[in-house]
Every structure is written in C-alpha cells, then in structure tokens.
Image (tube, coloured by chain):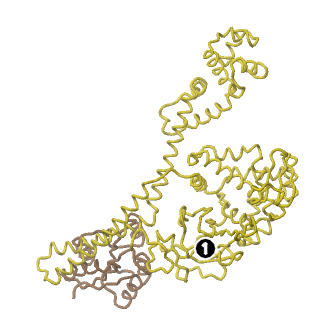
Chain colours: A yellow, B brown
Amino acid sequence: MRRPLIGARIRERRRRLGLTQSALAGRVGVSASYLNLIEANKRPIGGALLRRLAVELELAIDELDGAAERGLLADLAELAADPILASLRLDAAAPEELVGRHGAWARALVRLHREYRARGKVIAALSDRLTQDPFLGESVHGLLTHLAAVRSAAEILESVRDLDEAQRSRFVSIIGAESRGLSALAQALAAYFERTLAGTPPTPAEEVDDFLLERNNHFPALERAADALRAAIGGAAPPSTEALSRHLESAFGVRVELRAVGTLPPAAQRRGHWLDEGTGVLTLAYMLPEASRRFVMARLLAERFERGEPIRATLEGSAVLTSDAGRARASAVLAAYLACALLLPYEPFLEAAVHARYDIDFLGVRFGASYEQVCHRLATLRRPGAEGIPWALLRVDPAGFVTKRLPLPHLLLPRYGVACPLWAAYAAFQTPGTTVRQLAAFPTEDRFLFVARAIEKPRPGHGLPRRLLSMMLACDALYADRTIYGEGLDISSAAPAVPVGPSCRLCPRAGCAFRQEEAIAAA
Amino acid sequence: MGTRVLIVEDDRHIIESLSFVLQREGFSVAAALDGEAAMQRLRSDPPDLVILDVMLPRMNGFEVLKALRADAALQAMPVIVLTAKGQKQDRRLAEAIGVEGFMTKPFSNQEVVEAVRRVSAQ
C-alpha cells in the first residue's frame, strides 16, 4: 500500500511545482526514466533518495510517505465495505489514486460517511428511547384507557334511545371526567415532546457515556493489552507495587519518588501525584493511599504501553465520539480501564468475585485495590461466555451530581440531574464508609439490589469539608442470592422492598413523602 | 337468570358503561377492581365468563389468567382479555396461556357485546 501512494504523491507535487520529470530527476541525482518508474509505482523508494525528494518537493517525509494517507485509505476501505455501497462494485484500487491525487475529496467522503453512521446511531438510540421510555409507555396506556371509557359512554348516549334523565346525565358526566383526564395527559405529552425534540448536541461527557454504553463497558482489546503488559512486567497477578515502579523506569524511563505533598506543584497537590515530563520523575505524595499509588502507576503504564496504540485503536471507528474533547475524555477513561484490567486481571478477578460472592471489601484486600476500583472492575465483567453478574454503576457527590454512570437495560440511571432520593446511593452519605444495601422496588415492579458506600477522597486542604463520593452498584434482584449483599434478604416478588422510582419527574407514585418535583404525567 | 359476567378492570367508568350495556343485553354483571379481588370473587362465586383487563393493581391480568388456568375448578372458565398497551406482545402471551377472546382499547361496546355473546354461546 505504501509504494503506490508515494509515486502518485511525487508526481502530483512535482507537477504542482511546475517541474519536469528530468529536472527533478537531475536535482536528486537519478535518471528521468528511473524517476518515471518511481512515479508509476513500479520501483520502491525509501532512505536517502526519499529524503532528497522530500527536500526538493518542499514536503516533510511523513507527508510524502503518507502515514496520514494510510489511515485515510483504511477509512475508505471501511466505507467501501458498507453494505449500502455493495451494488456499486467499487474498484478496490481506486482509493489509492483518489487519496494520492485528491486527498481533500477523500477526506470529505470519509467525513460524510462518519457523519452518516453517527446519525444512524442517534436514530437508533432515539427509537430505543421511544419504545423504552417509561413515561411514554404509561402515557399511551393512560390515553387508551381514557379513550375506551369515553367511547363506551358516548356510544351509550348515541345508541340507547330509552335512557332516563339520571342515566343520561351520569354518562355525560363520565365523558366529562374522562375528557379532562385525557386533556391533562395530552398536554403532558406535548410538553414532553417539546422538551425532548429541542435537543442540543451532546457534551463530551455524554459522548463518552454513549461510547461506554455502545461497547457495553467491556473492551476485549484492552483486556488483551493488559495481559501483555502484565506479562512484560513479570507476570504476577496482580503485579506488585515494586514491579510497577521498576517497569516504569526500565521501559519508559520514568522514575517514581515518594515525597511530602507540599513538595508538589500547587496545581498537583489536590491529586497527590505529579509527572514532571522534563525530568521523567513521577512524584507520589505520602498521603496517597497505597491502592491509589498503584493505580497512578498503572495508568501511566497503560498510557505509555505500545505508545498508546491499544487505546487509540479502541477509540477508532466509534461513531459516537465526534468531538476532539469527547475523544480526549474517552482516551482517559480507557487508560483507567486498562490500568484497572492490569491490576485486577479478568479471570482471577472474576473467579475470586464469584467465590467471594462479590464481597467488595474482600476483593479490595485480595487485589490491593480500593473500593472504587473494585466497583469499576465489577461493572466490566461482561466478556461473552465468562460474564459476572451484570452490575449497573452510579457515582454521585453529596450535591447529587452524577459523576459516573453505567445503566442496565431496565434500570435507567439519570444522565442529568438526580435520581430518586430514596436510593441507597444517597442514604450512604449518612454513614460514610459503611455499606448500605437496599432491595428497591420500582413502579414497573422491577426489583434491584442496591449496594452503596460513601467513600472518602483525600482532602485537598485544611478547612474544607470531607470529600465524599457515593459509589453504588445495582443488580437485578434475581442475582441477589449470588452475592453476600443479598444474604438474609427475602427476594421473592411479594417480599417488602423500598418503593423507589427512577426520579420524581418519571415517577408515578402519588403521595410519596420524598417527592421534590411533580411527575411529568399526573396519574 | 342470564349468563353471569365478571368484569375485572381498574377504570370505574369503563366498568359502569360496560355493565350498563351488558345488562341491557340480558347478562348479569359483577365487577372487580384489581387482580386479587378478582381471584377471590372467582373462587367464592365463579361467573360464567370473565372480561379481564391486563394492567391491574396488585396482580396483573396475566397473573390472574395463569392462576385461573392452574386451578382445577376454574381452568375451563372462558376469558376475554382487554389490553391497552404492548398489544402484539400481550396478544401472544394471552394466546400462549389460552384465552377465548382478545380486545384492544378503545373498543366499541358492540364488539364487547358480540364477543360475550359468541363466547357464552360456545
């Protein structure tokens, strides 16, 4: 693929500069006929000749040898494989010429194709949303029921000739009452659509959200990369802290030093770690817990491993990551994923999790990981054929901000705003450090086991409040008996459970003492 | 005494109109507002035919239908199912458990009367 591109590029550039073949050949010290062979892609080119040509053509080597173009060619190959183009029988060789001679047009095609696929994803997501939205489901049911009552009473008024006055006014009043219910529902629906359709482009955080959902929060290529990286470090699972630090130095020239937090630059003191790119020193603060130090080192290893290629390749081709900010954010999330996979290897971790009945504290001790890291890893155990319990994950701060979310098909987690105030995620703030479990019953009659704990993050400075984040895992109540958190819980569908909702706006429970906002549809 | 029909439906106005129409056609009508009340009524004073809504409080229509088909004394009871949502899926489920009639809201009174006549004549 490399040669044809270069030949076409050279010819194209030479012509643009107004040089004849023999003039250029003379300047770089080859015969015109040899240059002709190169331009016709019949001779390989590289080394000193390529450098001389680049100088004469006023191009950088990578512009001439076309690393960017190779990526473009791969994109075009993907585009050509799209089933909607199958009947056109596109010439497999033509993209090379197109890229060589009309690069901008090739990029335009690829950009359009990407946009087209992104739109397809949005449409699919919207249609899912319409079929699964609990509010719409309830509303349609309500509309049909009101309508059935109106129709039935109206038909009686219309077709029964011998109604007495009392019967007549009774059926008229039924129609009146049902019509009022119908109007309220119709208005709520109209307001709902007005808000839903006034969509704004997704924020970078939403792009990442969609990306994780699209991939089901499981990345086989990163799991493989983690295994390879762990093998390079020495193979221990989990790798020791010393091995992580040794490998950073031997493979990437990064020296790890432990110091007092005050010696870090002010901006880095909040995090408790700092990488000085100039000196190649990674400073970890003493105050940083052991599990966090391990994670910081693992994440740096993940970023540097194979020059970031596994992460880049995973981001490639995602139609939902459309902005640079979204891609940068997703890249950081994937580095954390790879770090987690390095420290908590899939198979032994799954085995230990099943054996310990998903005891998060036990798993933390066993793998030298924090509570939060274990929760994140549990939510990634989705390898087909070797799946753990499907867990949803929610992380909120005391103000209710959702800072991380991974929903399940029947458990909607709020993307904006807050969930239901009854959820264990919020109750956990009342007793930081303690695990709060909850059997939660939704208005749909779906039941979930919620397991939440408020964890404390290092405090950035004196005089500031405790920094608490609540981590909550949730699984279908059917799986509760496979976890220690379900022990002693009656999980039969008739057993008492906390009557929760998705959020006040979507919750039909009338008279709930915890309600803060009216439901969009009045029941 | 005509055929005895039990209407299981949580919308009181629908019960009122359907009762009125069916009574005029000579049927004797009783009603239950939720699934549990329906089961009690079915066991204590079984009717000749049931009109059963799907979305019901306490015990939904399919649960009632399942319990009914599992009860030796009630399993032959003719049932007409009323539904307002997920119509295709509801119909499949109803057919799988076994029903004599299936109707979607908003139905016409005439459809209900005809279905009740047809099923009660069988």
Quadrant into which the C terminus of chain A falls: bottom left
Question: Residue most toward the front?
Answer: A463
Q: Residues within 10 Å of mark 1 (few under 14, many from 20)?
A: many
Residue matched to label 1 = A426
Q: Residue at x 65, y 73 (%)?
A: A452
**Dot 1 amino acid type:** Tyr
Q: Is residue A57 above or below residue A439?
A: above
Quadrant into which the N terminus of chain A falls: top right
Q: Is residue A389 above or below residue A58?
A: below
Q: Residue at x 74, y 71 (%)?
A: A355
Image coordinates for residue B103, horizontal then vertical, percent = 31, 69
- A148 relative position to A235: left or right: left
- A345 relative position to A281: left or right: left
Q: Residue A426: which quarter of the image? A: bottom right
Q: Residue A22: which quarter of the image? A: top right
- A250 relative position to A445: left or right: right
Image coordinates for residue A262, horizontal then vertical, percent = 82, 60
Image coordinates for residue B68, horizontal then vertical, percent = 41, 81
Image coordinates for residue A433, horizontal then vertical, percent = 72, 75
The residue lying toward the viewer, choosing from A34 and B82, is A34
Q: Residue at x 80, y 68 (%)?
A: A366
